[in-house]
Amino acid sequence: MLNYIKLVRVPQWIKNLFVFVPLLFSQNIFNKAYFLPAFSAFLMFCLVSSIVYIFNDIVDIDADKLHPTKRNRPLPAGLISIRSSVITVIILAALVALFLPSLNIRFRIFLLSYFLLNVFYTFIFKHIVLLDIFSLAAGFMLRVVAGAVVISVQVSSWLILTTMFISLFLGVMKRRSELVLINEDHNQNTRKVLASYSLNFTDQMSTIAAAGVIICYALYTVSERTINLFKTENMIYTTPFVVFGIFRYMFLVYMNKKGENTVEIMLTDIPMIINVVMYIAAILLIIYRFSL
């Protein structure tokens, strides 16, 4: 069972929490009528993302066997057969087909778009410089927009831009970590697109992406729409948490040589966990109390 949990990448489901962003910022997180569809959307993205992960593992099984960390995954390690993996995909797809009709058509379109994007990423996009990173960013943006349409609310353009820049930032940091790994062991070049990147190039991109996250989020907190919606100007006080999170992540990548596994950082780094908890607490306090 543990091998199958690793196969479907349960820890990676944390990325699908972006679906709840519109719910949180629309002041409906405690509204059952809105929360249930959003939670259903989250589960749908978890199932579809697991299908994508397994599909990608099957396609890249030979390359993963040469990777220092990916070779420990169930498929390349031989702990689960390709046949069993295909059966798992069929079961997950059946669950999606069973529960998806309960959600509106617009959400289904975005979920399908997310799946097709990842199929193209597996075969084409991940081999093209820059397009590989932008494909990852598009996946996060689709999660946010899908989270908005499933509960029929509008999402701020500044939040969408913030999502784009933070996902670009994480993608670039991942590429940089992979480059460092390759530089330490020249026999570990298992991703061809990395030949088109350099540490200097990724450093410049990460700086631009980090600045984009901070600027877009800061502008969101002081925008007229945000102030009118929440009836408070106090959202600006949540900006330091975002800045600290970006700087902390850069510290872990540059100084501690982490970053290849974003989820691992978010779940194991104590300062990052505390910062996220404090940020969410501040958001709840400001949006759901100060705006009453």
Image: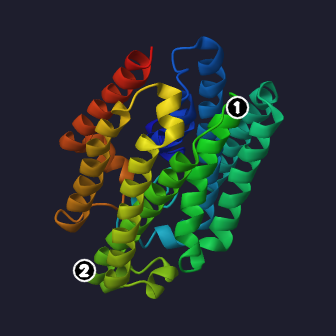
User: What x and y, as percent, mark residue 160?
Assistant: 56, 49
Neighbourhood count class around disc 1 (C-alpha, 10 Å): few under 14, some 14–19, many 20 upward: many
Amino acid tagged 2: Glu
Q: Which of 28 and 124 lies nearest the eye of the viewer?
A: 28
User: What x and y, as percent, mark residue 140?
Assistant: 55, 51
Q: Quadrant of the C terminus?
A: top left
Amino acid tagged 1: Val
Position of 43 with respect to 181 (left or right) is: right
Position of 85 with respect to 73 (left or right) is: right
Circles 1 and 2: CB distance less than 8 Å?
no
Position of 196 with respect to 215 (left or right) is: right
Tell me the residue that label 1 is attached to: 150
**Residue pictured at 54% horizontal, 59% vertical:** 137
Give residue 87's quadrant in the image: top right
Image depth: mark 1 or mark 2 in front: 1
40 vs 117: above or below: above
**Residue pictured at 36% horizontal, 55% vertical:** 214
Give residue 35's quadrant in the image: top right
Task: Name the colour scheme.
Answer: rainbow
* Circle 2 SS class: helix
Q: Work out whether residue 46 can be spotted.
A: yes
State which tag comes first along the sequence, 1 or 2. 1
171 vs 30: above or below: below
**Residue pictured at 45% horizontal, 87% vertical:** 195
Neighbourhood count class around disc 2 (C-alpha, 10 Å): few under 14, some 14–19, many 20 upward: few
88 vs 24: above or below: below
* Circle 1 SS class: loop
Q: CA distance from mark 1 to mark 2?
A: 45 Å
Mark number, residue 220:
none
Q: Work out whether residue 77 can be spotted.
A: no
Mark number, residue 184:
2
**Residue pictured at 60% horizontal, 12% vertical:** 32
